[in-house]
Amino acid sequence: MTLKIALPNKGSLSESAINIFKEAGFRQRSDAKDLIFLDPENDVEFYYLRPRDIAIYVGSGELDLGVTGRDLLLDSGAAAIELLNLNFGASTFRFASREGSDLSGKRIATAYPGLLQSYLTERSIKASIVSLDGAVESAISLGVADVIADVVSTGSTLRQAGLKVFGDPILESVALLIARKHDSKYDLVLRRIQGVVIARQYVLVDYDVPKNALDAACKITPGFESPTISPLQNENWVAVRAMVLRKGVHKIMDDLYDVGARGILVTDIHASRL
């Protein structure tokens, strides 16, 4: 049975979503105008859709899997669930205004009315929602809103509009692999994508170390289960290979050097099965 998978056709999630499937061994369209692409080797049909629509199609059961943001999934109200955090496309959903932080009785402009309404209802806040389709940062200067609620990545667009965020984040969003429900027929795709997600978080570190410093070095690089240790021609030294978290690799290299390791090399991991 051919799986039908939806990927964003544009926007901040599109390129990363396509790349993660490429790294997982799935073919992708070569022409950005193609809306459907068949990967016969993996028996998958890809649909390139508006990110905002993907949760609707997956939740209705028309498509099996999809990549979209958590913010768009929750805003849609679709009957779809998170299968996997893809670890890219991080953003926060925040309130912003020119001054003040009171929401009661205010006009709040947003492109995420469903998400905002849920937030206000849960907190018994009475405010009117001005639903817009993008570019909400202009709503205050144009006089249609007092406050905006929008997805913020860097905050530069808000600053250019003279706005400041306030309050705690409404939602922390990230790109997700979603489905209508868990199903064993998705296991292969899930395992491959999960392998890429994990691989991106780790690197391989190779180094040579004197035997009398091996225990100290292995404490620095314990590996995923255990480091690989190989003999060298110099019987007083050994070679070590271990997986380490990418974000801490430079500190690890410094610590290894301090205990006597040399020839320290770092290699990217493109896929994994752990």
Image (cartoon, rainbow, N blue to C red):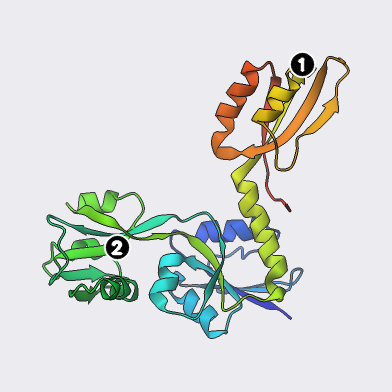
Can residue 205 be seen from the camera position used here? Answer: yes
Q: Quadrant of residue 72?
A: bottom left
Q: Name the side, left or right, on which 175 lies relative to 182.
A: left
User: Which residue is depicted at the point 44% across and 55% down?
Assistant: 90
User: Which residue is depicted at the point 46% across and 56% down?
Assistant: 89
Residue type of the residue flagged with mark 1: Asn
Foreground residue among 223 and 51: 223
Instruction: Identify whether 66 is placed above or below 96.
Output: below
Dot 2 corresponds to which residue? 150
Dot 1 corresponds to which residue? 212
| CA gap, disc 1 and disc 2 | 57 Å
1 and 2 marks in contact (CB < 8 Å): no
Q: Name the side, left or right, on which 153 lies relative to 231.
A: left
User: Which residue is depicted at the point 39% across and 56% down?
Assistant: 91
Q: Name the side, left or right, on which 133 lies relative to 77.
A: left
Label 2 residue SS: strand
